[in-house]
Image: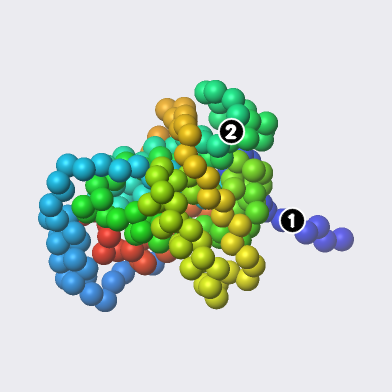
Amino acid sequence: MYTKVIIRLTKSACIFTLGLWMVACGTNNAQSTAQLKSEKTMRMDNGQRDTATFGAGCFWCIEAAFMQLNGVIEAKSGYSGGFIKNPSYKEVCNGTTGHAEVVNIVFAPSVIGYDQLLEVLFSLHDPTQLNRQGNDVGTQYRSVVFYHNEEQKTMAAKAIEAANTVPEWTGKVVTELVAFEVFYPAEAYHDNYYNLNKEQSYCSYVIRPKMDKFQKKFHQLLKEE
């Protein structure tokens, strides 16, 4: 008799698996890439600041990606869109507060635009999955843009419309577009979680592949190492 074992890696219950994960990194245009990074880094920051708030599944992954972008000053994991004050991670994970896991991003618009942040957002997750991302299931993992002003609302609506034309997605985009009200920072141990826990199974098998894809696609927007 044979027993079929299905391994499901979720954020709330990470399972270690046998095998070796190999990542091949490289670039055919290293010199050109370095030059582009340098040029982006040297662009003048005029001191203006703006804020973007996105939900796209597990906030560990989204935070790890956005904090690498040149022009992003801070990317902080937390909770938005619920109906109780100061929710805990446990409460949000239980799906009883109405909050989504989000990342609150402070950025310099003279260095990176809101439209570029939206482009990154829609490359980091599947916006056609309703209230889930992969094996992470629940309304806390919903795809949502919390806009801070009318300009962001208009730009986000156009980005959602454009995402509906991407051949990669087989279903309709279900990303919510909601006016921002309040952001509650997550507990301190969530800060920079991926970079501090890369060997943890969820980080290794779920987040790392997304990060590899993100870094390859947006290498010209990344901060210099």
> Residue, x 27% and y 60% (percent of image)?
221
The reply, left or right, for residue 175 in relation to residue 23 is right
> Residue, x 42% and y 28% (percent of image)?
188
State the image quarter where residue 22 is shown: bottom left
Disc 2 marks which residue? Answer: 82
What SS does tag 2 mark? Answer: loop
The reply, left or right, for residue 72 in relation to residue 150 is left
Q: Residues within 10 Å of mark 2 (few under 14, many from 20)?
A: many
Mark 2: which amino acid?
Gly
Mark 1: which amino acid?
Val
User: Which dot marks residue 5?
Assistant: 1
Quarter of the rendering occupied by the N terminus: bottom right
> Residue, x 15% and y 60% (percent of image)?
38
Picture layout, residue 193 above or below residue 135: above
State the image quarter where residue 129 is shown: bottom right
Residue 196 visible within the image: no
